Image (spheres, coloured by chain):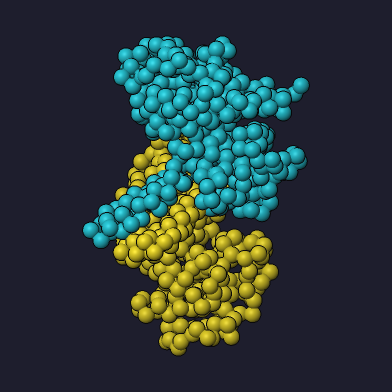
Chain colours: A yellow, B cyan
Amino acid sequence: MKLAIDGMGGDHAPKAIVEGVLLALEDFPNIEVQLYGHQQQLQPFLKEHDRLTVIHCEEVVEGEDDPARAVRRKKDSSMAKMLEAVEEGRADACLSAGNTGALMAGGLFKIGRIEGVSRPALATTLPTIDGKGFLMLDLGANSDAKPENIVQYAIMGNIYAQKVRGIEKPRVGLLNIGTEEKKGNELTKAVFGQLKETDLNFIGNVEARDLLNNVADVVVTDGFTGNMVLKSIEGTAGAIMSMLKDAFMASSKTKISALLMKNELKNLKGKLDYSEHGGAALFGLQAPVVKAHGSSNARAIYSAIRQASIMVEHDVVDVIKTTISPN
Amino acid sequence: MKLAIDGMGGDHAPKAIVEGVLLALEDFPNIEVQLYGHQQQLQPFLKEHDRLTVIHCEEVVEGEDDPARAVRRKKDSSMAKMLEAVEEGRADACLSAGNTGALMAGGLFKIGRIEGVSRPALATTLPTIDGKGFLMLDLGANSDAKPENIVQYAIMGNIYAQKVRGIEKPRVGLLNIGTEEKKGNELTKAVFGQLKETDLNFIGNVEARDLLNNVADVVVTDGFTGNMVLKSIEGTAGAIMSMLKDAFMASSKTKISALLMKNELKNLKGKLDYSEHGGAALFGLQAPVVKAHGSSNARAIYSAIRQASIMVEHDVVDVIKTTISPN
């Protein structure tokens, strides 16, 4: 399969991107990579590889660029060219760690929605204490959602969990402020009623405080709430890890303690590490579009490439098409 | 001042409540406590105190009771009687660790809204890394909110931060998915415009991931989002602390490590401990109504009593009245 990759997006580009690509090429013999970016800037990190093609692009979409217009205006940017490769059938999927909004708008504009999907959704796998993780969507592709949008998120998330994660009957939960059916705002009450009517394995409302305890395989919510909850989890984990680091550095006694705990702390950090879980994917477009975390290191890029390749391999997009499309 | 306290609400009632009351009576010479509850059940934990009166009540509002009707139906419950004491002017403020919904509905029904306040809001102080904390509201008094409701939350939160926390010009932030003015859903965009027009020290949008880094003194949001974010923070902190505990118990080596870190870990836990921060308060009612955490221990009840007494002492309700009321 052919993957188009934006070499210039993200805080550690192009180094982390090129290194991640090289790692992935080594481990996944079935992928061919088209790497889009500024030749001179990519060069220092590149190695020759028979399944790697570099395509020079003059421009770069920056974090500050207006999401709605970035890809249209910067026609020769690595992001625009990467999306174009998918649009024109020269690549099966694409991946960027750059401007999320620009990638979403550009994906919608260049690659287009699956017929019948009214709103694409941004989804990611979040860690749980037991290491299994769960899929959450929408994480912010649409700030406002109608009940029927969220039902489609559930259908798409269900397919992903089945195909990519191999869960036969994924437990689908609705993120809400209480577990009882009547809890919530007008939106969640309407969604609850509609999800009950589907043939999904809908397990009802799930609460934010239980998310990390593996209460569901797929958790759906509107993009505003999803983004809030994602960032609350990330922010809290980051804050506690930073407090913990300070605690371990407090004195020579605590430094010895840190040494004794070295493996366990590494293990704990690994469980919370987004870089093992791939990126976020835009569901509902005509091809997989993967958004790696802006602060991705080479390992995170590697995981995101693995995720994109699995989505292609398991025909996630085609299954969404046949499930959702009217005909 | 006179405080009416529900002796029967919460997971550790009546023991934790009675013990918290006795601690508070010792430290705060200006309070008189009316303790409502089942005499026989309170008895084992009670001590004679000249500023403590026990009022026997036959009934208890349970966690499963329908919030909207609990207080009306259980007329002789400790919660109903406590609210009645405030309603009839026999107490200046009240406090319960019981059914949140019932307390909110009962408070509205018995004590009533301040004229001009369209929706009361539930507010609490959350910890930050630097130990200062911030006030967040609404945490779920109303699942759906209009822009003007959130502006009132900001005005009430601002008064609390000034009066209770002694911050001259509290930084008021709007919880949103990005810091730029145009970010967010329809609701936050409308609120942003209205908050700019107030004379509050409105610092714009704040992101959930920065909450624990002391980005604002008062953070406003709708009750659905507030509840989600609160529970995400609590859930993540709880999950990480439990993972950390497991890590420290993994082997004899890590147990030694835990011993060496004892003080620092206690300190870390203390920073994240809700029991030092008091309870949640319902803003916008004719008297302070404080909701202590359901899992409150004696220390948490003590802190919540302190909070209620400070709200009375600093006339928080009167200042909200004169600020918001039309005349």
Q: Position of residue A97 (x, y in %)?
A: 53, 68
Q: Is residue A18 visible?
A: yes
Q: Position of residue B75 (x, y in %)?
A: 44, 11
Q: In this rendering, would A21 be left or right of B90?
A: left
A18 relative to B216, above or below: below
B65 relative to A274, above or below: above
Q: Is residue A314 visible?
A: no
Q: Which residue is located at x 35 percent, y 25 percent?
A: B15
Q: Return the residue nearer the eye: A313 or A28.
A: A28
Q: Which residue is located at x 31 percent, y 55 percent?
A: B258
- Looking at the rendered structure, the number of numbered marks drawn on it comes to 0
Q: Residue furthest bottom?
A: A48
On-image quarter of the N terminus of chain A = bottom left
Q: Position of residue B274 (x, y in %)?
A: 46, 39
Q: Position of residue A63 (x, y in %)?
A: 62, 65
Q: Quadrant of residue B122?
A: top right
Q: Quadrant of residue A105?
A: bottom right
Q: Residue furthest left?
A: B252
Q: Which residue is located at x 35 percent, y 13 percent?
A: B39
Q: Return the residue nearer the eye: A201 or B138.
A: B138
